[in-house]
Amino acid sequence: MKKVLVVYYSRSGLTEFVARQIAARCDADIERIEDGRSREGVLGYLRSVLEALVGWRPEIQKGRLRSADYDLVIVGTPVWFWGVASPVRSWVLRNRRALDHVAVFCTYGGSGQAKALDDLEHLCGRAALARLALTEVAVSQCPGNPAFHRFLLELKRVRSVAISWLPLQGQAAA
Ligand SMILES: Cc1cc2nc3c(=O)[nH]c(=O)nc-3n(C[C@H](O)[C@H](O)[C@H](O)COP(=O)(O)O)c2cc1C
């Protein structure tokens, strides 16, 4: 069975929700990127915008899992200022040599998703095997969302990832 890692950053929980959905369907390990900085409130928001704008690479904590141990790494980011969230930038640049096969996803408010995923692929140094972008509204319907299904099917097609279509605990059938 293919070993899959889902790695993500999330400020307010939406990208985390999608990451957990993907990990559950792919029987993947999951790791949250931690930068140890408060991004709460207006100041945290402005700092985050600024870091995305200038392409900053904040310090991040060393993760528990090694991306080199996986057949596929799925990287998720919220869209920040039409780009990648800065902690995700730091993680990718730290791990890119071990990223042979990647898929990417993002959550976003309303614009910039294509550029953010392009930037993320560029940072990874290779084309993504599959891409997924979900608006904040679409996140809540994620298990039944057609784009979400297509993303999983693509992972199965190109990387033989075993997908579980069973409803997850506490959720209606997709
Ligand atoms: C600093 C910052 C910048 C953002 N920039 C954008 C943007 O350029 N385009 C957009 O559609 N949404 C933008 N958003 C909204 C987030 O992408 C969206 O709410 C996302 O789903 C949040 O994911 P999270 O809950 O995992 O943090 C921004 C949010 C923050 C905090």
Image (tube, helix red, strand yellow):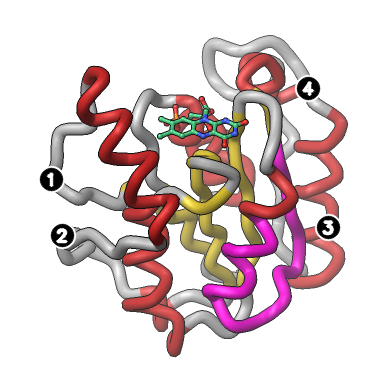
Q: Secondary structure at mark 1?
A: loop
Q: Could you tell me if the residues under marks 1 and 2 are in contact, i.e. CB atoms within 8 Å?
A: yes
Between the residue at mark 1 and the residue at mark 3, the CA separation in whole angstroms equals: 34 Å
Q: In front: mark 1 or mark 3?
A: 1
According to the image, label 3 marks what residue? 154
Q: Could you tell me if the residues under marks 3 and 4 are in contact, i.e. CB atoms within 8 Å?
A: no
Q: Amino acid at mark 1?
A: Gly
In the shown orientation, is residue 158 left or right of residue 75? right
- Residue range highlighted in magenta: 117-133
Between the residue at mark 4 and the residue at mark 1, the CA separation in whole angstroms equals: 33 Å
- State the residue in front, 68 or 108: 108
Q: Which label's residue is closer to the chain start, 1 or 2?
A: 1
Q: Could you tell me if the residues under marks 2 and 4 are in contact, i.e. CB atoms within 8 Å?
A: no
**Quadrant of image for the C terminus:** top right
Between the residue at mark 3 and the residue at mark 2, the CA separation in whole angstroms equals: 31 Å
Q: Secondary structure at mark 3?
A: helix
Between the residue at mark 1 and the residue at mark 2, the CA separation in whole angstroms equals: 7 Å
Q: Secondary structure at mark 2?
A: loop
**Quadrant of image for the N terminus:** bottom right
- State the residue in front, 62 or 21: 62
- The residue sitting at 17% across, 62% down in the picture is 59
- The residue sitting at 63% across, 49% down in the picture is 105
Q: Amino acid at mark 3?
A: Glu
Residue 61 tag number:
2
